[in-house]
């Protein structure tokens, strides 16, 4: 499994010859190093419908004939744009060609602003991916919740630290202590002034913090990291 972080909640993953992007908010993401029309993916995973997560999903899906995996209400809505979708709901897992993907709880809201109105689209979620070798948890936007302790063995955890809309650093440190991942990576900060944070205050206070550069590819080799 290879993965990289591209600012905000944008994560790219490659495993089993499949290319995945999570929450492709590219246009308007000031830290992002990607350009929409150059992204090559097979699957797009969405944690919820907020515009800073759906981002450029429709364009990327059309460019690549990619499948969007999201909460059923959000998947149904995006299906109206004539793209391929796979709806899931919290607690459910499905075996995809890239691995087993579980839709996990997140404590957050989920609506899409289409420029005229806010459309409520089900619940927000996280994702737990097990490719048979490693497990990667993307928390999405969420508050701290104690059931994070039950996620199971996690190798890599992407945790929001921006505060105001999601966990802040203090709660994200508690989340990392509950999840006990081998790598804890902060996301969803500094994109907007209201979520300004020092990520080092997170990484230096968890036992396993990692602050990747934008676009840095991290490869997990073999059975264990
Ligand atoms: Ni959100
Ligand atoms: Mn967000």
Image: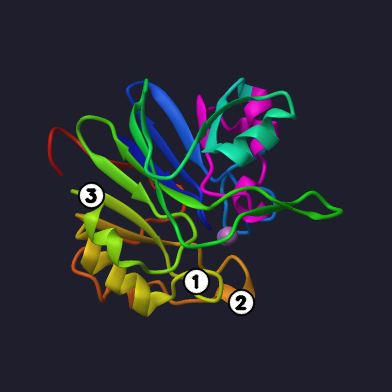
How far separated are the C-alphas under marks 3 and 2? Answer: 30 Å
Quadrant of the frame with the C terminus:
top left
Q: Residue at x 44, y 28 (%)?
A: 19
Q: Residue at x 52, y 62 (%)?
A: 108
Tag 1 near tag 2, CB within 8 Å: yes
Task: Kindly report which numbered mark, 3 or 2, lies closer to the viewer in this rendering.
Answer: 3
Magenta-highlighted residues: 37-63
Q: Where 24 sits versus 80, above or below?
A: below
Quadrant of the frame with the N terminus:
top left
x and y, in percent, of residue 2 in the image: 33, 37
How far separated are the C-alphas under marks 1 and 2? Answer: 8 Å
Q: Which residue is mark 2?
A: 194
Image position of 21 (left or right of 51): left
Q: Where 143 sits versus 85, above or below?
A: below
Q: Where 66 sits versus 200, above or below?
A: above
On the question of residue 75 being in view, the answer is yes
How far separated are the C-alphas under marks 3 and 1? Answer: 22 Å
x and y, in percent, of residue 6 in the image: 50, 50
Marking on residue 162: 1
Disc 1 beta carbon < 8 A from ligand 2? yes
Image position of 2 (left or right of 141): left
Task: Kindly report which numbered mark, 3 or 1, lies closer to the viewer in this rendering.
Answer: 3
Give SS at disc 3: loop
Image position of 218 (left or right of 39): left
x and y, in percent, of residue 213 in the image: 41, 56
Q: Quadrant of residue 127?
A: top left
Marking on residue 154: 3
Q: Nearer the viewer, residue 93 or 207?
A: 93
Q: Is residue 58 magenta?
A: yes
x and y, in percent, of residue 73 in the image: 62, 40
Question: For the residue carrying disc 3, how many other residues have a C-alpha within 10 Å: few (<14), some (14-19), or many (20+)?
Answer: some
């Amino acid at each position: 499994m290879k993965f990289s972080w591209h600012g905000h909640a944008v994560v790219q993953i490659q495993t089993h010859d499949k290319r995945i992007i999570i929450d492709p908010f590219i246009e308007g993401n000031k830290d992002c190093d990607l350009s929409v029309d150059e992204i090559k993916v097979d699957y797009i995973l969405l944690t919820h419908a907020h515009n800073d997560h759906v981002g450029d999903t429709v364009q990327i899906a059309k460019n690549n004939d990619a499948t969007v995996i999201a909460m059923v209400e959000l998947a149904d809505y995006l299906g109206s744009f004539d793209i391929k979708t796979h709806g899931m709901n919290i607690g459910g897992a499905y075996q995809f060609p890239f691995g087993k993907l579980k839709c996990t709880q997140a404590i957050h809201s989920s609506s899409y602003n289409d420029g005229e109105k806010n459309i409520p689209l089900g619940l927000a979620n996280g994702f737990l991916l097990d490719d048979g070798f490693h497990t990667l948890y993307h928390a999405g936007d969420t508050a701290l919740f104690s059931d994070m302790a039950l996620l199971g063995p996690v190798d890599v955890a992407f945790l929001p630290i921006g505060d105001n809309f999601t966990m802040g650093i203090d709660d994200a440190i508690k989340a990392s202590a509950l999840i006990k991942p081998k790598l804890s990576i902060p996301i969803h900060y500094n994109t907007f002034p209201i979520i300004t944070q020092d990520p080092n205050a997170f990484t230096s206070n968890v036992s396993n913090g990692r602050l990747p550069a934008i676009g840095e590819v991290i490869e997990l080799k073999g059975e264990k990291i």
